[in-house]
Image: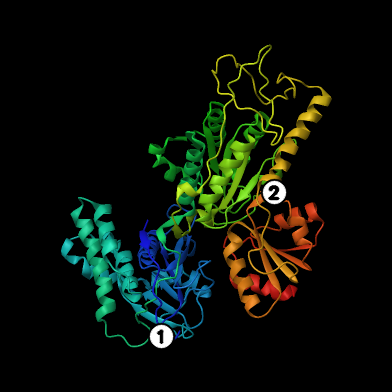
Amino acid sequence: MATALRAALPAEPKAPVSERPDHVVVRFAGDSGDGMQLTGGQFTISTALAGNDLATFPDFPAEIRAPQGTLFGVSAFQIHFGSSRIDTAGDQPDVLVAMNPAALRVNLKDLRLGGLIIADSGEFGERNLKKAGYDTNPLEDGSLAPYQLLAFDISRMTLEAVKEFGLGNKDALRCKNMWTLGLALWMFGRPRAPIIDWLRKKFGPNELLREANIAALNAGHAFGETAELSGPLKQFRLAPAEVEPGFYRTVTGAEALSLGLVAGAKLAGLPMFFGSYPITPASSLLHSLARLKEYDVTTFQAEDEIAAICSAIGASYAGSLGVTSSSGPGIALKTEAIGLAVMTELPLVIVNSQRGGPSTGLPTKTEQSDLYQAIYGRNGDTPLPVLAARSPSDCFEVAIEACRLALQFMTPVILLTDGYIANAAEPWRVPRMADFPPIPVAFHTEVPREGHVNPYARDPETLRRIWIKPGTPGLTHRIGGIEKSYSTGNIDYSPENHQKMTDVRKAKIDGIARFIPEQALELGEAGDRLVVVGWGSTYGPIRQAVEHCRARGLSVAQIHLRHLWPLPRNLGELLRGFERILVPEMNTGQLKTVLRDQYLVDARPLSKVSGLPFRIAEIEAAILGML
């Protein structure tokens, strides 16, 4: 994490783009054991401290440790940073750091023509070339002519840099990610001090590893400073981004989500209970919340997904804010218990960090294919609100909104993120909690004058049922999965009562549309020829594509949905004001089908299920095609 207090910036003289680029995309790639995620993460922190806006995309294999040098074992970390607004991790890298032949082969197709390749020539031996499927050495055969190439033996230079510490060859080579990071820090004018401080904290009393990694970092930086190189290795300095003054920190989606859930519980004055079972990519939320126990947060790692959600339901029954999380396969296992939470009408926040499916699918890759599951995927008529975050920093406010809806309407709420949002990082302006209204919570304590209390007595405006803490004197009550009487709360199987209770549960959720904001346009104007409608992590590429098209004079607008069920009350009227509707999704067209069903509009899909986020160019091409 990086934090910085940003004041308003004075205007700087503008340099020509050729002398000072406005933004740069860098991708670090190597074996899953080469430390590329760590390298990218530390470079992200240094970039944030330099004041640049940024977005990252960690991309790593599902295998814990894939065979070294193989194509499917390549791990990459991409960062897009600059002195202007950054909405995506970038379509094409400008700089590719390839630590071995497999990293080059897997990532070369994404590098822009004329981009810079920095390759560790020491790893391009015959064995590694064969593993990557190369018949000849690409560093020598001229196949990389369309690009700028810098190949030097990073492995050898790392060994020389740490030689004095007497490490074995294997341990010494583990420092080469720090050598690479040092070179990257020099290239973009980043200070080494924050990284050195981090290394000292990380290795603590292990002086040997601490000093070896620092030496490797300094050696990479010195190489950039002193090497007599002609051609592409130059130093680039990007001006800080112009941002609203305030206190900023880098944040991943999982971190922002954990802070938002805690904030929601605090705004409601309730303790929070988080019951979860580890699953990629949702486990990072459990890790983050486990570090926040001083804020009245209890985290419980259950033995399975069913126990995790049932423990959270039990906590809500007892008067806490219950929260659980998983990814698509785990949400499927939780489905029966979600129905129980709907039937008992208890507040519960369910976080789904989506990944590629079905079944085990693509554990470490991103997708948006659980929308049907969130809206419809339970037995019986079991309506509940569904929300989606658009970016890592947006997770904070969406988490608070999920807590508000769960408590205001006594209902489970599903909050959708995805693998990209959970792992990606961006700067976040830390808000003032005084700017958020409290979430009112009132436990029922009034004892009836005669008879027993009806736990399904309802507020006439919201249709929420009363919430009674177990053990409240005179208010012994029973709730559960069997249908209850609308008027008494006793078990009631009668056809008339089941019809009434089903209708009331549906009306309660449908009525939430009156308590959420009307849908607004992100870009463009009502009546433009085409509107691009998105949800979740497609926000960044859609926004950039629409901005590019509007700059060319095209009549195109953007709508991005946070509330996916119930949909905003004015959305149908808004959509009908456009000639054409395009819905980009990382699935086969789920939101498109929902919009067609609800509003009878001719929404057209743009589908992508490759495990990778949309590129701006893909959406831009679809817009041009529809116009």
The reply, left or right, for residue 396 in relation to residue 414 is left
Residue in the image at 51% along x and 78% along y:
112
Residue linked to disc 2:
372
Instruction: Between residue 489 and residue 175, name the one nearer to us.
Output: 489
Residue 352 in view: yes
Residue in the image at 73% along x and 75% along y:
625
Q: Residue at the bottom extreme?
A: 230
Instruction: Between residue 60 and residue 451, name the one nearer to us.
Output: 451
Instruction: Between residue 229 and residue 133, name the one nearer to us.
Output: 229
Q: Split into 4 quadrants, where in the image is the C terminus?
A: bottom right
Checking the image for residue 19, the label placed there is: 1
**Residue 527, horizontal then vertical, whole percent:** 75, 69
Disc with the residue nearer the chain's start (2 vs 1): 1
Mark 2 Cα shell of 10 Å, populated few (<14), some (14-19), many (≥20): few
- Check the image and report above or below for 337 versus 445: below
Secondary structure beneath dot 1 equals loop
- Tell me the distance, in whole angstroms, between the alpha carbons under discs 2 and 1: 49 Å
